[in-house]
């Protein structure tokens, strides 16, 4: 693995390792069952002590991204369990139908009348409500738009966006009005946190972890950067390590010459950097907007849903539209 760690006051060394391996896994740079270096080997490669790497591996294991196999080593975990989720959705459907029939019986309607009513209403234009929880609200709105675009004909998206922090704070208040939503989308690395919080709140939900990757235009822009110019990288504190990994992978820049700042640094520090070009993450863009830094002096690390995430999400919604008919689903494709 091509990882980069350094003396960064914003991000502890073990978190730098976590962020970069997490990015490789969720961006599908590493695939399920790929073997990771041993703790000792990776520590030696990066010049870290084994305790730092062991803590990074424990963190990734707790997130469900890697797994240990006795006598074999550490491997990337399998991240999808579609058949199990489908079984749970069917069980939830049966429960909802039982409640409907119980109410219909109480109202004095016979089975034929209930059936006619259901068929008539089910044939109407459908609206699917879902929740998108991301590290920041701009990101949630961005990915909600990409997810909504994958809805099949006859189905309209009705997304509700919030931050993971808001979900972990006043999530009950925010989700009460959206209790009809069943699917919750988040980044793959946030799935354990989101699942735990929804379970704690008592919401029945299927949490879907999506993966993202750099856009082709961003990769082209990074590869075209002149190493002789002056650059400043601005990111959220937790994203500095992952951003540096992207720069090391797709550009020819010397990372030691780049000024590193976060979106929480004072305005004077950001402006005093005075680079030829600011490179920023999506989440740090509002800070640069606020400081009036023009677009021609900025390069944003643009991410979008990966082809794998698009295809998986499209098939999920297609199964809703087609009644989960596997024979029909096999012929559905999505442009990645």
Image (cartoon, rainbow, N blue to C red):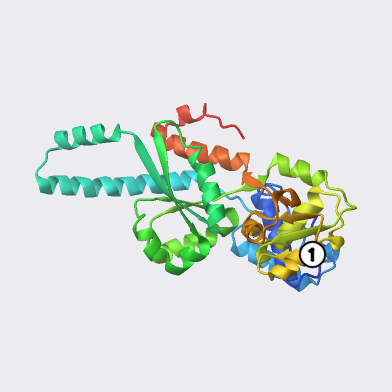
In the displayed structure, would residue 255 be above or below residue 7? above
Please tell me in which quadrant of the rendered image residue 278 appears: bottom right
Which residue matches tag 1? 273
Residue 64 percent location from the top left of the image: 59, 59
In the image, 135 versus 84, the foreground residue is 135
Please tell me in which quadrant of the rendered image residue 322 appears: top left
Residue at (60%, 40%) from the top-left corner? 308
In the displayed structure, would residue 126 be above or below residue 248? above
Residue at (85%, 57%) from the top-left corner? 230
Please identify the residue farthest to the right as the structure is shown. 228
In the image, 262 versus 176, the foreground residue is 262
Q: Quadrant of the C terminus?
A: top right
Q: Is residue 153 left or right of residue 282?
A: left
Residue 50 visible in image:
yes
In the image, 287 versus 246, the foreground residue is 287
Please tell me in which quadrant of the rendered image residue 21 appears: bottom right
Residue 3 percent location from the top left of the image: 79, 58
């Amino acid at each position: 693995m091509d990882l980069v760690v350094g003396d960064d006051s914003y991000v502890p060394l073990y978190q730098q390792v976590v962020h970069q391996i997490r990015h490789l896994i969720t961006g599908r740079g590493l695939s399920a069952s790929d073997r990771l270096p041993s703790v000792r080997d990776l520590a030696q490669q990066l010049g870290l002590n084994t305790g730092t790497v062991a803590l990074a591996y424990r963190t990734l294991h707790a997130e469900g991204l890697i797994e240990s196999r006795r006598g074999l080593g550490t491997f990337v975990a399998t991240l999808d369990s579609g058949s199990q989720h489908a079984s749970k959705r069917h069980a939830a459907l049966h429960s909802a139908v039982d409640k409907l029939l119980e109410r219909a019986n109480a109202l004095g309607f016979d089975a034929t009348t209930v059936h006619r009513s259901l068929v008539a209403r089910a044939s109407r234009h459908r609206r699917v409500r879902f929740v998108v929880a991301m590290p920041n609200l701009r990101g949630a709105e961005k990915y909600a738009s990409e997810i909504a675009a994958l809805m099949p004909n006859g189905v309209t998206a009705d997304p509700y966006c919030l931050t993971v922090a808001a979900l972990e704070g006043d999530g009950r208040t925010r989700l009460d009005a959206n209790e009809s939503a069943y699917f919750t989308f988040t980044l793959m690395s946030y799935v354990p946190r989101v699942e735990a919080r929804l379970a704690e709140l008592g919401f029945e939900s299927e949490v879907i972890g999506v993966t993202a990757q750099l856009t082709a235009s961003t990769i082209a822009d990074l590869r075209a950067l002149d190493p002789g110019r002056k650059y400043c990288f601005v990111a959220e504190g937790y994203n500095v390590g992952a951003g540096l990994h992207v720069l090391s992978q797709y550009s020819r820049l010397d990372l030691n010459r780049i000024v590193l700042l976060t979106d929480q640094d004072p305005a004077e520090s950001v402006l005093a950097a005075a680079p030829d070009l600011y490179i920023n993450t999506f989440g740090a863009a509002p800070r640069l907007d606020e400081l009036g830094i023009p677009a021609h002096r900025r390069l944003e690390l643009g991410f979008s849903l990966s082809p794998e995430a698009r295809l998986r999400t499209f098939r999920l919604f297609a199964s809703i539209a087609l009644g989960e008919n596997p024979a029909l689903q096999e012929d559905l494709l999505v442009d990645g």
